[in-house]
Image: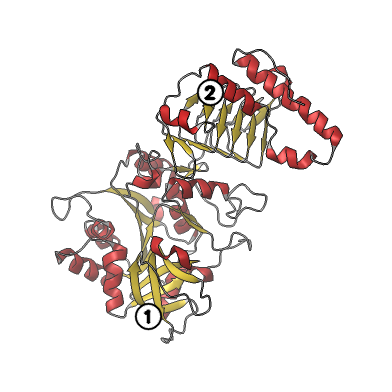
Amino acid sequence: MSVKKVLAIVLAGGEGKRLMPLTADRAKPAVPFAGFRLVDFALSNLANSGYFRIVVLTQYKSHSLDRHISETWRMSTQLGNYVASVPAQQRRGKSWFLGSANAIYQSMNLIGDAEPDIVVVVGADHVYRMDFEQMVQNHIKSGARATVAAVRQPLEMANQFGVIEVDTSFDTGVVGAHKISAFVEKPESTPGLPEAPDQFLASMGNYVFDTDALVEALEQDAAKADTKNDMGGDIIPYFVDRDEAFVYDFSTNDIPDATDRDRNYWRDVGTIDSYYEAHMDLISPLPIFNLYNRAWPIFTRNTVSPPAKFVHGEHNSIGTALDSIVAPGVVVSGGVVENSVLSNDVFVGTGARVQDSVLMDKVMVGRGAVVRRAIIDKNVKIPAGATIGVDHELDRARGFTITESGLTVLSKGQVVSPPDAAELALAKAAAAELPAALKLAIRDDAALEATMDKVAGNQLEAAESESGGEPAKIAE
């Protein structure tokens, strides 16, 4: 089989309204995620697949995204490789991108310059690992003109995705490839799969096209008056109607060193709650998504931060992190971090507590402060003795975002006012609680319980001392 020339197009113009306030100052693909940016997952998958000619189409608040790509994603120009960030340019009419299909249509010059046989189109806001070369080979062998990657999802979630229905009577001769009989956006219901009645195939927003077929489809779509200019809503149905669209079942994609637990992991992080849950997927001893697969690394900008460290604070308070991911540059100085993800250069002060939370770069947690079930964007400084996520009414009064599930979210650089006496009391009460992981470890050992009471007492004494209160004892 002859080698096909492949151009990869990353659709990164998304506004990400459902991720507000994290997208108040940046495009959705630029949102930080566990020390990476969301776009890094798509770009890493393409690079690991052997595709090094990549264009990233941007539009909404793209400065931080453009800067990240220019600083991070540098390919060998001597070999003709590149990752190019391309903004909307009004090449075909006086309008910005009208949809994902229109973004490619207005950037058709990129396809003309690259002269590829195959165009791979991927989204930039999902967390997953995928070998696109396997999908491309599947596309070629099946004879499809358009191939849609699909992930299996529970039947009750059909109204949240583009749903792919397949014609199993048509034999493509290729494992995991079936002709698409219908492509429906967010239906109320859909039939289950024959071999898995409780599941359906959801579009991942990743596509493979024969170049000439894609160009023709985009030209015809642009000429229509009744189009949303959308890849899933308009271009794929065009191929379905012509019996030229096939599905690629993501469950057949094989990644080196994948574990049984994280194989075929895919998460759409389009909402604050799903974004938070994806972080929580990372931190179990056997993670649902394993960041530590060296055979298929996720790449991002190298940091110049020093290694993380955990040190004693005043009053012999112990700096520690339990069931957490901690990035370079983090300093936990006499505070306690539990079940959380801390990005580069976070500081947690003496007697402070961070629980079930996601903290982005350079967040400062003051002495005796408490952060609970929260997402804190970059550069937020939390004063000594303050609380985040402990009292939702207090959080709302200060202008913080509260999700329906009870997450507290602070935007980039959001100001947190110093605590009053009532808030200081909240922080002190929270500082007296032992971490859940320690409670579990010592529940059957009286001697350890007594020791940990002393440890917790030191934390509380440090917290109260730093916030101006009198030292207090742990209740018996």
Residue 233: which quarter of the image? bottom left
Residue 148 locus on image (x, y percent): 39, 69
Q: Is residue 462 in sight in this rendering?
A: yes
Q: Does residue 20 sit above or below 137 in this rendering?
A: above
Residue 443 locus on image (x, y percent): 79, 40
Is the C-beta separation of discs 2 and 1 under 8 Å?
A: no
Q: Determine the CA span between mark 2 and mark 1.
A: 61 Å
Which colouring convention does the figure follow?
Answer: secondary structure
The residue where tag 1 is placed is 143
As helix, strand or loop, the secondary structure at mark 1 comes to loop
Which mark is on residue 386? 2
What type is the residue that disc 2 sits on?
Ala
Q: Is residue 152 in sight in this rendering?
A: no
Of residue 137 and residue 428, the one placed in the foreground of this image is 428
**Mark before the other along the chain sequence, 2 or 1:** 1
Of residue 331 and residue 423, the one placed in the foreground of this image is 423
Q: Does residue 141 sit above or below 113 in this rendering?
A: below
As helix, strand or loop, the secondary structure at mark 2 comes to loop
Residue 93 locus on image (x, y percent): 13, 54
Q: Kindly identify the residue that appears in the image at 63 percent across and 61 percent down.
A: 259
Which mark is on residue 457? none
Within 10 Å of the Cα at label 2, are there few (<14), some (14-19), or many (20+) other Cα atoms? many
Q: Kindly identify the residue that appears in the image at 60 percent across and 12 percent down.
A: 468
Within 10 Å of the Cα at label 1, are there few (<14), some (14-19), or many (20+) other Cα atoms? some
Residue 452 locus on image (x, y percent): 77, 30
Q: Quadrant of the C terminus?
A: top right
Q: Kindly identify the residue that appears in the image at 49 percent across and 62 percent down.
A: 130
Q: Is residue 300 left or right of residue 463?
A: left
What type is the residue that disc 1 sits on?
Gly
Q: Does residue 345 sit above or below 384 in this rendering?
A: below
